[in-house]
Image (cartoon, rainbow, N blue to C red):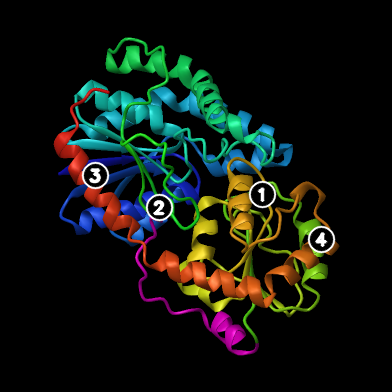
Amino acid sequence: MKLLILTYGTEGDTRPLVALGHELLSSGHDVHLLGDARTLSSAEELGLANSALSGDIRQLFSTWSSQGPKGVAKALVQLTNANTRAWMVETLAAAEGCDAILTSGLAGFIGLSVAERLSIPAIGTSMIPLTPSHDFPSPFLPPGLVPHWLNNASLRLTNQLVWFAFRKSLNEARQTVLGLSARQELPTKHPMLYGISSTILPQPADWPVHARVCGQWQTPAGEFTPPPELADFLHAGPLPVYVGFGSMAGIDGPLLAKTLVAALAGRRALFYPGWSGMDDIELPNNILRIGTTPHDWLLPRTTAVIHHGGSGTAHSATRAGKPSVVIPFAGDQAFWAERLYRLGIAPPALNGAKLDAGSLGKAISFVEGFEVQKRAAELGKQMEQEKGLVTAVREIEKLCYRVKPPF
């Protein structure tokens, strides 16, 4: 089959789709990936054909992250609406001759519309649970806000809010680019495959048959030779703590560095700046700043992971058998922090806006505990048994042969 994978988001949004694309390629399918230009390096590394969509999500995060979660959400809506027509044109051109579209992220509705125009199947993909369930509330609402009996309704509500935010620009592009009529209702009937581990979020019993938790979608472990400085640091003492906030930007670097140094209290640590802008901040000798390093290689060589709670990092830390300290910034991050806390492998989420050395130090001490370390190791072994990519490819192949578009 010839397949198009469409996504738009951060590194954490794109990398699992790259992993899925690589697995599909290895299974004999012709695959092309569309995504933000700054997130396509992993596709290049794996030899996955790819093209950049219009827009620059890193610049957006750098500009708006200082305004908090509401500022980021507003900026994401503006970016999507500003680029909807361009994404529609770019997706239509890339999808010509394809047998199906796998669609995800901020460009999700666009993939559904282009598939409708070409009369080919569209399969939704996500690393965030978007299908309503009574088992959990909307991942985009603060944990504890929604009473259990409103779980299902809360996700239906946030899904509708997202639809209302994008509907006008989407329908304009449907009409001008695709020649399709405006869509008045949120599309919900298409298949949904989730690159989510059942160890962290079991398949809800009340989900429809077209929604499936597959397991984590992780890029294949390749050979990696660490830089001499990293190798020497790892061999020089006990396992370090890993600290990294991925694609989060707009962070008060000097304040965060001061807080980290005090909370670590001399513990050995690895620090990955990511998009934080902290590449040049001075750090003491017990903290080594590192560049991009494969999580599957690095995290097993640590004792705990301090991160922002993105789905990808939460999954990778758990798979490595390591507990987490989660400092959510926006979006679904607090949801994953809550899942890890309920599993017993993380303390309650820390408030990044009010982060202090005392609370962070206590959280680090918590994840160093024997029972927490033991629990994390057990869940890591359980998660290793999951075959998320194999499951997803099998589902895609079955769906493409039986789904009759449009949705």
Q: In this view, does 98 lie to the left or right of 132?
A: left
Looking at the rendered image, the disc whose residue lies closer to the viewer, 3 or 2, is 3
In terms of sequence position, does the residue under pointer 2 or pointer 4 come before the other? Answer: 2
The residue beneath circle 3 is 396
Dot 2 falls on a residue whose secondary structure is: helix
Identify residue type, mark 1: Pro
Numbered label attached to residue 48: none
Horizontal and vertical percent position of residue 274: 59, 58
| Image quarter hosting the C terminus | top left
Residue drawn at x 40%, y 22% is 85
Crowd band around label 2 with a 10 angstrom C-alpha radius: few (<14), some (14–19), many (20+) = many
- Above or below: residue 146 compared with residue 375: above
Numbered label attached to residue 359: 4
Identify residue type, mark 2: Pro
Q: How far apart are marks 3 and 1 (CA)?
A: 32 Å
- Above or below: residue 134 compared with residue 380: above
Crowd band around label 1 with a 10 angstrom C-alpha radius: few (<14), some (14–19), many (20+) = many
- Which residue is more in the foreground, 201 or 388? 201
Please give the range of residues in magenta: 216-237
Q: Is residue 314 magenta?
A: no
